[in-house]
Image (cartoon, rainbow, N blue to C red):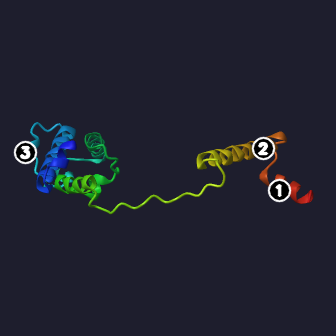
Amino acid sequence: MARLASQSAEEQLAALTKLVATATATVLAHPDPAALDTQRPFKDLGIDSLTALELRNALNQHTGLTLPATMIFDHPTPAAIATHLADLLTDTAAPAVPAAQVSTRGDEPVDDRLAYLDQAASRALRAVHRQFSKRRRTPTSLWRQSRWQR
């Protein structure tokens, strides 16, 4: 993908179209990638849901991008995917949005606070399980007991 930076937009699109056609031919076990019609829908080429995922994984590997599983259905032809990849790789699809600032209270990272909440939820579930399993109480009997002790 480093070669694309030095190419014009038309050359980039041609290279990406060739990449998508080659990956499609590989997934379909087609002998000649150049013989594939890049304007033809994937459904007509014989791509099903399993081969769509294989194609997406191959394109992930070749481009270094993380592409959605629905990419083949969102962009139904190899040419459409090549155009989409060109947009993603040149950052013209959407302007960069600054990352949202997460305010943390104290020096403790957010992950540590979430881990604390996870531990607290786990302890609460174990306590409820012990209460139910002591005398094989039902949720209704536990509710009645908690109402009487108030």
Q: CA distance from mark 1 to mark 3?
A: 71 Å
In primary-sequence order, the first of circles 3 and 2 is: 3
Using a 10 Å C-alpha cutoff, classify the residue at mark 3 as few (fewer than 14 neighbours), some (14 to 19) or many (20 or more).
Answer: few
| Label 1 – label 2 distance at C-alpha | 15 Å
Q: Position of residue 97 (x, y in %)?
A: 40, 61
Query: Where 112 sits versus 92, above or below?
Result: above
Check disc 1 and report the residue beneath it. 143
**Outermost left residue:** 35
User: Residue tagged by mark 3?
Assistant: 35
Q: SS class of the residue under badge 2?
A: helix
- Identify the residue shown where x is 59% and y is 46%: 111
Residue 64, how many percent across, how many down? 30, 43
* Residue at the limit of the structure toward the right, as seen here: 149
Label 2 sits on residue? 127
> Which mark is first along the chain, 3 or 1?
3
- Element at badge 3? helix
The amino acid beneath tag 2 is: Ala
The amino acid type, in three-letter code, at marker 3 is Ala
